Amino acid sequence: MYHKTLSARIIQIVLILILAIVSFVALVPILHVLATSLSSPTAALQSRFLLFPREITLDAYRFILSASSFWNSMGVSLRITIVGTFLRILVTFMLAYALAHRDLPGAKVMSYAVLFTMIFNAGMIPTFMTVVGYGLRNTLWALMLPTLIDPFNLIIIRTFISNIPKEIEESAKIDGCNDVRILFTIIVPLSMAAIATFSLFYAVALWNAFFDAILYISDPDLFPVQVLLRQVIMQGAGMDSAADDIFVPPRTVRMAVIIASTLPIMMVYPFIQKHFAKGVMLGSVKG
């Protein structure tokens, strides 16, 4: 028993060391970007790699925060993320609730259709033609509607709803509730952990999406912040800052834009952390 306990402790220590090394490796790029964005132009130009800021200054952030294009892109990304996440959660739960009832006519066919989209998809060109055909090009709806339902998340939520005791729904129907009221007054409150978890997944995906914006958006006023970040990094352009009295090297501007565009979505996680650990296991076990 002693040797087994000692072996378990050794394995635990080794795993902790491995996780610590992996965490440090993952943090190094973030620390480098943050340190460079906070360093003075001289320090940033003299050193190609920084883990700690030198001659700390906020000039880079003053530069980007005075740019109207940055705030416009942030607003676009916020609208896409908030509205898109709400629509995805709403439609996914409504469809999952319907498919969770096996006695629903056509439920099995619809389930197979959802599974089919996980394996096969139309491709970029047919999707682009569909978006153009519906008149969604150069609108924010083009960034939200084509990916409204994620099949994998839908299956998990459907499985979770299927595990809710049917007696609860039967009691509600006896009291006169219809399916819509059952969904929003019973199923949704019981699914807050799932809503918090998948809202985080959807919000991160919408906030970081830029390829769809490149395909469907040509109006600079509708560029999300990730497209602006791409322009700043790859082309060194896209920032029309009003702070002309500040000299900031392009490299420092890039780092500051990366931090400023990443920080808002990172601030979401602490608010739903208590639901996340429970939510990621939803639907993993079929009852």
Image (tube, rainbow, N blue to C red):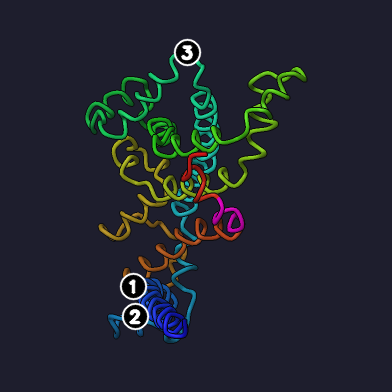
Q: Nearer the viewer, residue 69 or 264?
A: 264
Farthest front residue in view = 1
Question: How far apart are the alpha carbons under marks 2 and 1?
Answer: 8 Å
- In terms of image quadrants, where is residue 34? bottom left
Q: Would you say the residues marked 2 and 1 are in contact, meaning their CB atoms lie under 8 Å apart?
A: yes
Query: Residue at left 50%, top 56%?
Result: 265
- In terms of image quadrants, where is residue 3? bottom left
x and y percentages locating residue 66 in the rendered image = 49, 61
Q: Nearer the viewer, residue 21 or 218?
A: 21
Q: Would you say the residues marked 3 and 1 are in contact, meaning their CB atoms lie under 8 Å apart?
A: no
Taking the image as drawn, is residue 182 in sight? yes
Q: Main secondary structure of the magenta part?
A: helix
Q: Which mark is residue 44?
A: 2
First reached walking from the N terminus: tag 3 or tag 1: 3
Instruction: Give the vertical position of 84 relative to 5 (above or below).
Output: above
**What amino acid is at disc 1?**
Pro
Q: Secondary structure at mark 3?
A: loop
Question: How far apart are the alpha carbons under marks 3 and 1?
Answer: 63 Å
First reached walking from the N terminus: tag 3 or tag 2: 2
**What amino acid is at disc 3?**
Pro
| Circle 3 residue | 105
Instruction: Give the vertical position of 280 relative to 185 (above or below).
Output: below
Mark in front: 3 vs 2: 3
Q: Secondary structure at mark 1?
A: loop
| Circle 1 residue | 249
- The answer to if 246 sits in the magenta stretch is no
**What amino acid is at disc 2?**
Ala
Mark in front: 2 vs 1: 2
Q: Nearer the viewer, residue 203 or 282?
A: 282
Q: Which residues are magenta?
A: 272-278
